[in-house]
């Protein structure tokens, strides 16, 4: 391909469609399709629009890997004789800017321009390198309603206050964050792994039972469309056809007009029984689990019932404060035992990504039980000796480097643990440890800490000494690079 062809402009016209097998388009869009040459979209989109495509049209399937798809976009023939630009007409579901392909086009073409610019180190080489002369990109969007809008329309539900989460090819963290933050109305884009049933089961596992689920299947298809509003228990054992999407709502009164399910509303015996439980609070006509600041120590499942094997609640909260978690992104909890620090951090700062490490195998069941009890999904648990455990980072892991580390247990190997932590800690990272002096504690962890900080060139902040009731003094230690 000649180098000047790379300098031509590229234009993407992205057209949103629904699941209707006989789509309607305004005259302007029909004219664009009629005069198009190169079209693209998913296989389902191709089936829907195939009757409208002109004779001899080229179709590029949007499939993984996307890099190969975008390579085809940049290499297909020029639009027409005398027109040195390349035009691709892309079909997408709903609004192409709503977690859609239009965003991907913008990102991918920007990446290609940056990569091509980086491959040449001088102005002369850039002039001689066709790969460095990536075209400018114009994107024109003709949207239609996205699936969550359509589901809200079918439910006659205002959606300006809806929290949107995409689980389409994405992991759970944003969904978990919406639950922990007690979003009243959550719209969820699903996929074959994150189905309505698996979503409902996750909510049940972690105690988020105060929602009803509305599921929209094949929205826009006059013969296949179906909208269902059911309890989470029923959704967890029901299979729904793809494509579908979900709206979760705690407004029982609104959904009760569409469901014959018994609901816990004000004035009922069920409602009175629930709110008498101190772990719940009234929110409008529904009842929600309270979001407390500090979980009582006695509420946790303990290791062998040993009360001393938990970071006490006041110390726990001061520890989170020392870690400066509102400004952090990734917390490592080394020696989690009951999981109290990880769970408290997850509930108070749901934006955090948390990796929890523990050498004792019996603690794995304990942290999972406590996490479910307090509604703290999304804590990644690692069992084994931290010094020999592969770190959960690296290419393809999807995990960023830690910028906050709490050392809850070290087994006398504090220096070795800190040395390993420092190989991955970010430049603005913080390490915190709680030291206790007691007759039965033979290891002077404060001294080990001071020696390690000196050896590794860490800057210490003034220690904080805390005494609770008749317990031994606790010293909160904090250091950074």
Image (cartoon, helix red, strand yellow):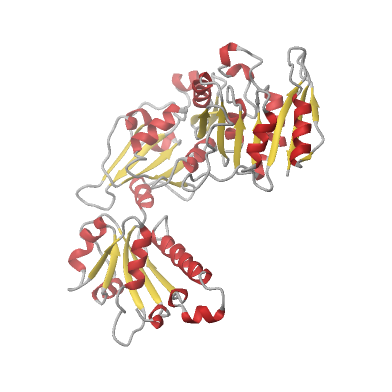
- Residue 294 position, x and y percent, is 65, 27
Residue 443 lies in quadrant: top right
In the figure, is residue 252 to the left or right of 241? right
Residue 94 lies in quadrant: bottom left
Instruction: Give the residue at x 78% y 32%.
Output: 450
- Residue 434 position, x and y percent, is 72, 27
For the residue pair 24 and 93, the one nearer the viewer reads as 93
Q: Quadrant of the C terminus?
A: top right
For the residue pair 318 and 255, the one nearer the viewer reads as 318
- Residue 6 position, x and y percent, is 40, 78
Instruction: Give the residue at x 45% y 46%.
Output: 165
Q: Quadrant of the N terminus?
A: bottom left
Instruction: Give the residue at x 74% y 12%.
Output: 440
Total label count? 0
For the residue pair 171 and 7, the one nearer the viewer reads as 7
In the figure, is residue 221 to the left or right of 353? left
Instruction: Give the residue at x 42% y 60%.
Output: 104
| Residue 260 in view (yes/no) | no
- Residue 371 position, x and y percent, is 52, 27
Asked if residue 125 is positioned above or below residue 363 in the image, the reply reads below
Q: Residue furthest right?
A: 462
Residue 197 lies in quadrant: top left
| Residue 363 in view (yes/no) | yes
Asked if residue 457 is positioned above or below residue 86 in the image, the reply reads above
Asked if residue 326 is positioned above or below residue 470 in the image, the reply reads below
């Amino acid at each position: 391909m000649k180098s000047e062809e790379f300098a031509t402009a590229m234009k993407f016209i992205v057209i949103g469609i629904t699941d209707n097998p006989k789509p309607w388009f305004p005259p302007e869009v029909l004219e664009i399709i009629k005069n198009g040459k190169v079209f693209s979209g998913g296989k389902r989109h191709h089936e829907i629009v195939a009757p409208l495509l002109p004779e001899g049209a080229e179709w590029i399937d949007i499939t993984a890997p996307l890099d190969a798809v975008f390579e085809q976009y940049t290499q297909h023939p020029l639009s027409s004789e005398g027109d040195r630009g390349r035009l691709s007409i892309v079909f997408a579901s709903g609004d192409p800017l709503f977690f859609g392909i239009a965003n991907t086009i913008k990102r991918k073409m920007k990446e290609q321009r940056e990569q091509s610019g980086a491959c040449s180190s001088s102005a002369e080489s850039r002039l001689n390198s066709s790969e460095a002369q990536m075209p400018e990109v114009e994107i024109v969007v003709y949207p239609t309603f996205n699936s969550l809008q359509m589901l809200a329309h079918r439910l006659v539900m205002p959606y300006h206050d809806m929290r949107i989460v995409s689980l389409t090819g994405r992991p759970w963290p944003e969904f978990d964050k919406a639950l922990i933050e007690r979003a009243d109305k959550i719209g969820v884009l699903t996929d074959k792994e994150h189905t309505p049933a698996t979503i409902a089961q996750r909510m049940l596992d972690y105690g988020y039972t105060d929602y009803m689920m509305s599921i929209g299947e094949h929205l826009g298809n006059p013969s296949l469309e179906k909208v269902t509003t059911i309890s989470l228990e029923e959704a967890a054992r029901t299979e729904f056809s793809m494509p579908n999407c979900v709206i979760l709502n705690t407004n029982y009164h609104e959904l009760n007009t569409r469901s014959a399910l018994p609901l816990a509303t004000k004035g009922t015996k069920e409602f009175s029984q629930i709110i008498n439980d101190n772990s719940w609070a009234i929110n409008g006509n529904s009842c929600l689990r309270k979001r407390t600041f500090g979980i009582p120590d006695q509420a946790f499942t303990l290791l062998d019932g040993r009360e001393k094997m938990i970071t006490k609640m006041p110390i726990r909260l001061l520890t989170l404060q020392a870690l400066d978690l509102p400004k952090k992104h990734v917390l490592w909890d080394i020696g989690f035992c009951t999981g109290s620090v990880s769970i408290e951090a997850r509930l108070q700062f749901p934006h955090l990504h948390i990796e929890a490490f523990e050498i004792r195998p019996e603690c794995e069941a304990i942290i999972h039980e406590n996490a479910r009890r307090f509604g703290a999904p999304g804590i990644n648990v690692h069992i084994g000796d931290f010094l020999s455990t592969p770190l959960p980072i690296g290419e393809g892991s999807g995990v960023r480097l830690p910028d906050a580390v709490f050392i809850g247990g070290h087994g006398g190997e504090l220096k070795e643990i800190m040395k390993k932590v420092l190989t991955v800690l970010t430049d603005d990272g913080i390490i915190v440890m709680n030291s206790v002096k007691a007759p039965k504690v033979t290891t002077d962890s404060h001294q080990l800490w001071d020696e390690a900080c000196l050896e590794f060139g860490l800057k210490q902040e003034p220690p904080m000494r805390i005494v609770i009731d008749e317990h031994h003094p606790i010293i909160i230690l904090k250091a950074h690079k």
